[in-house]
Image: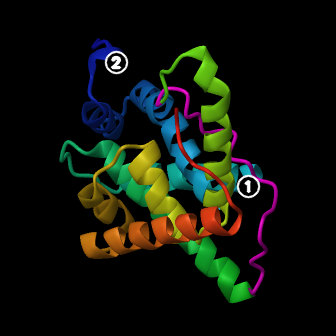
Amino acid sequence: MENLNLLTDEELALSYINGDNKAFDELLARTQDKLFSYILFVVRDEDKANDLFQETFVKVITKLHEGRYIDSGKFSAWIMRIAHNVIMDWYREQRSRSLIEPTENNDLSNISGGEVLDQNIENRYVNEQVLADVKKMMNLLPPTQREVVFMRFYQDLSFKEISELTGVSINTSLGRMRYAILNLRKMTREHNVALQLD
């Protein structure tokens, strides 16, 4: 029996399709944190994020069993695309019911910026405050802008990858980022917030 830890995500997916349920368990363990963080960042509600995460994995399982996954070396991009579609379906459903309510006081504490910052202790407090301010302002962005900012800066995806995952052109992804940056700059001016990492 193969050591599942040594298999790629793609190999695990194909093993699962061929009946190895443990391969799926390994695949889930590898991808769940990144996927859940992404969903939570976009929807800003932990209960809803849990629901959408479950729905995403039900769709992943269904698509795998239907043979709709083709090994292209991009399994994680494939499941992120499914998650994106699940989220967008949920937003459309909410919009059609006219039940969209702004969520307040979501501080995005699930996203850590610590690994980005490797400064000395004297600057840590200032940097933490700057990151907290940025997260608060990001919560005020429209979902499509918030999504592209998260994918670019927190998941380090290229604009090509973002466009593939979200199903829009690279120009649309770039445009959403541009508007997000303009909106963030406007918020910093309006609220007199200084955003400079030391």
Determine the residue positioned at 39% across, 58% down. Answer: 81
Element class at badge 2: helix
- The residue singled out by tag 2 in the image is 4
Q: Specify the amino acid type for callout 1.
A: Asp
Q: Which is more N-terminal, label 2 or label 1?
A: 2
Q: Where is residue 78? Give x, y as percent.
A: 33, 52
Seen from the viewer's position, the closer of residues 139 and 16 is 139
- Position of 4 compared to 43: left or right? left
From the image, tell me which residue sits under label 1.
Answer: 45
Picture residue at 37% right of the left edge, 29% below the top:
20
Q: Which residue is drawn at 78% across and 80% down?
A: 99
What amino acid type should be assigned to the residue bearing mark 2?
A: Leu
Is any part of residue 197 visible from this angle?
Answer: yes
Q: Position of residue 70 (x, y in %)?
A: 21, 51
Magenta part of the protein: which range? 98-116
Query: SS of the residue at dot 1?
Result: loop
Residue 7 place in picture, x, y as percent: 27, 22
Asked whether residue 65 is in view, the answer is no
